[in-house]
Image (tube, rainbow, N blue to C red):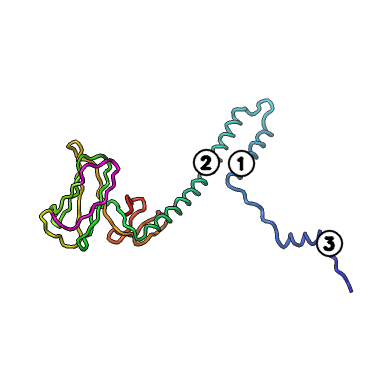
Amino acid sequence: MTTVQQTGGSYEALMEAMNPKKKAQKTGVEETQDRFMTLLVTQMRNQDPLNPLDNAQVTSQFAQLSTVTGVEKLNKTLEVLQGSYQTSQSLQAASMIGHGVLVPGSTFALSEGRAVMGIEATEPADDAKLVILGGDGKPLKTINLGRLESGTIRPVTWDGITDTGAKAADGSYSFEIRATRGGEKAKATALSFGEVLSVTTGGDGVKLNVPGMGVVKFGDVRQIL
């Protein structure tokens, strides 16, 4: 009976040939550093002994390398942070499905004698009113909101009863905000109400699908109800 012996060296060589090790790929920062050091060493070896490199020049070159390296690392860090932010934003947006939101807009729907809208005061107001308009543009209902502080976001409901005591028909209406401060017009934004049906994500960010409003940017949401 013949015994075949395998030496350790032959076996290791065979396994290495069958499973070659992949060389670790260098990052852009490492490649930049390698190129810089190669050029610097070559420059120093071939410098004129009677006119050697100025220390200030070498220091300046190192500073430039440090700047380039730092910018590249910063860009990679920002990419990671952006990815994490988009993921967090998507999860937060998904939790809004089925909830009502207030976004910039000046229209609303009256259904079964109930409607919701809102106001955002971008600066203080001594007096603010929400005026609901009919199809002819004439005021149907004026809702007094009183004094508002800057940054105030307030939802407003309407039961469909006009200033004359009549009941408005279900349908679509528009409204406007009339705010004043010291007798002058104050800045305020009208907010429309809608219920989030679904969420979509893409290269242009997270968006909410709201019936009656269409696609709404996540960043446009002023309040979740």
Q: Secondary structure at mark 1?
A: helix
In terms of image quadrants, where is residue 63?
top right
Image quadrant in which you'd find residue 17: bottom right
Q: Quadrant of the C terminus?
A: bottom left
Marked residue nearer the N-terminal end (2 or 3): 3
> Dot 2: what SS?
helix
Q: Nearer the viewer, residue 8 or 109?
A: 109
Q: Is residue 152 above or below residue 138?
A: above
The mark found on residue 33 in the picture is 1
55 left or right of 190? right
The residue that label 3 is drawn on is 7
118 w.r.t. 38: above or below: below
Circles 2 and 3 in contact, beta carbons < 8 Å: no
CA gap, disc 1 and disc 2: 13 Å
Q: Label 3 sits on what residue type?
A: Thr
Report how far apart the C-alphas of labels 2 and 3 lie in the structure.
Answer: 52 Å
Measured from the top left, where is residue 168 in percent x and y? 15, 60
- Which residue sits furthest bottom? 1
The spot of residue 82 in percent (x, y) is: 46, 49
Residue plotted at (19% across, 42% down): 127
Specify the segment rendered in magenta.
Answer: 145-162
The residue beneath circle 2 is 71
User: In terms of sequence position, does the residue under pointer 1 or pointer 2 come before the other?
Assistant: 1
